[in-house]
Image (cartoon, coloured by chain):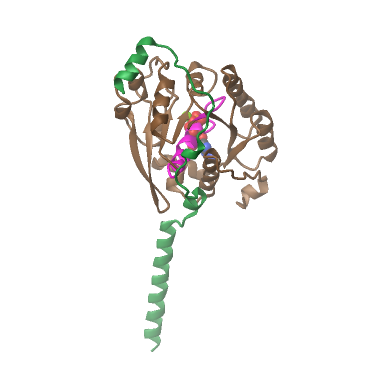
Chain colours: A brown, B green
């Protein structure tokens, strides 16, 4: 299953969510994360990798897919898993993305979950990865402007006859009304709520996904629920209020 | 694989895409993800273990001191 993680604007947490959800999905099936944000790649930064070969080389025909995919072993709690990564990195130059859909289709034969971290906005860099995906999730922050930006993904998707499969509210601090607005404006399917947490930055500094560095944290549990929903195991997402967020009761 | 991609680069066309088919039966494992993340933090477990041992030693020392 090819799953796009998209957003209207950058900085909402697409890469953070792609990487962490992928670590957990890898317990359910073979999983690869593709850094589809070739203009501003950063999956490798989140994972502390400096890949010699990556997606741009594959698209240019200078490297094979095999050479550009990296296997990362992870331990979540007591359980071990392996996540595969197809990073994008290297010098900022014009990259021809036309071959991208074929690359992910090739990956789809080999993997149960192909998670694509898509570039923000309306550019061709966002369009092609979205074209190639079967499911499209939109990440927003609980802010009116962010939800408004997220609606762009709906227009990009519908321009090629696709529908958004669900919305993910990231950096949630109990803004119930805004989570409802996101559902109304973007997708009735609230696939997940991921709370604001200091552990996200801490894990980033260690160079590990937070579900690996802090598996028993509340924010990791949020991602577990999201991963289950993405894998088709219906899980209820509670829209809790500010008080519950501050008292950590949710 | 390399040949495939090169061939694709040459004709430079966006290939035909399949529609929104979702193959959920592919999900092979039945582990509960929520359980995986809530499994005990081994560091915390270790700290608790060390504390228990320390308390036991203190109690022992106190007892032997008293006797
Ligand atoms: N749930 C969260 N809580 C706290 N900080 C977060 C959270 N999600 C993302 N961030 C922070 O937001 C910033 C942008 O995240 P990133 O994943 O790089 O966004 P994007 O890929 O959408 O540009 C990072 O500094 C990240 O640490
Ligand atoms: Mg990013």
Question: What is the residue that sits farthest to the front in this orientation?
Answer: B25
Q: Nearer the viewer, residue B61 or A61?
A: A61
- Give the total number of marks visible in the rendering: 0
Query: Percent from the top left, x then y, of residue A1?
Result: 48, 32
Residue drawn at 36 percent across, 19 percent down: A59
Q: Is residue A172 visible?
A: yes
Question: What is the residue that sits farthest to the bottom in this orientation?
Answer: B67
Quadrant position of residue A84? top left
Q: Is residue A39 visible?
A: no
Quadrant position of residue A168? top right
Residue drawn at 51 percent across, 21 percent down: A131
* In this view, B53 is above or below A25: below
Question: Is residue B60 a member of the stretch shown in magenta?
Answer: no
* In this view, B21 is above or below B62: above
Q: Nearer the viewer, residue B21 or B57?
A: B21
Question: What is the residue that sits farthest to the top in this orientation?
Answer: B11
Query: Percent from the top left, x then y, of residue A230?
Result: 53, 38
Q: Nearer the viewer, residue A46 or A129?
A: A129
Query: Percent from the top left, x then y, of residue A6?
Result: 53, 28
Q: Is residue A34 left or right of residue A11?
A: left
Residue drawn at 59 percent across, 43 percent down: A234
Q: Nearer the viewer, residue A133 or A19?
A: A133
Residue drawn at 33 percent across, 21 percent down: A57
Q: Bounds of the magenta span?
A: A3-27
Q: Is residue A104 left or right of residue A153?
A: left
């Amino acid at each position: 299953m090819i799953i796009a993680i998209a957003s209207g604007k950058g900085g909402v947490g697409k890469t953070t969510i792609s990487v962490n959800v992928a670590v957990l999905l890898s317990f359910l099936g073979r999983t690869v994360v593709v850094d589809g944000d070739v203009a501003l790649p950063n999956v490798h930064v989140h994972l502390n990798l400096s890949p010699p070969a990556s997606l741009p080389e594959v698209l240019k025909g200078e490297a094979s897919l095999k050479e550009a995919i990296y296997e990362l072993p992870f331990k979540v709690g007591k359980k071990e898993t392996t996540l595969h990564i197809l990073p994008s990195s290297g010098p900022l130059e014009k990259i021809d993305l036309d071959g991208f859909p074929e690359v992910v289709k090739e990956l789809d034969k080999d993997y149960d979950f192909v998670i694509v971290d898509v570039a923000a906005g309306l550019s061709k860099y966002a369009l092609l990865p979205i074209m190639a995906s079967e499911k499209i999730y939109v990440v927003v922050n609980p802010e009116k402007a962010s939800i408004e930006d997220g609606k762009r993904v709906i227009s990009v998707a519908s321009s090629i006859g696709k529908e958004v499969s669900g919305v993910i509210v990231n950096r949630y601090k109990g803004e119930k009304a805004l989570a409802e607005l996101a559902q109304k404006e973007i997708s009735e399917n609230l696939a997940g709520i991921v709370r604001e947490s200091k552990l996200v930055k801490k894990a980033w500094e260690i160079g590990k996904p937070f579900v690996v560095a802090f598996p028993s944290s509340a924010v990791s549990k949020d991602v577990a629920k999201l991963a289950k929903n993405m894998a088709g195991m219906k899980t209820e997402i509670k829209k809790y209020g500010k008080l519950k967020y501050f008292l950590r009761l949710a | 694989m390399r040949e495939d991609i090169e061939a694709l680069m040459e004709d430079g066309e966006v290939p035909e895409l399949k529609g929104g088919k979702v193959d959920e039966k592919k999900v092979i494992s039945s582990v509960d993800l929520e359980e995986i993340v809530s499994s005990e933090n081994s560091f915390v477990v270790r700290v608790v273990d060390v504390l228990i041992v320390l308390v036991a030693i203190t109690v022992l020392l106190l007892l032997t001191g008293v006797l």
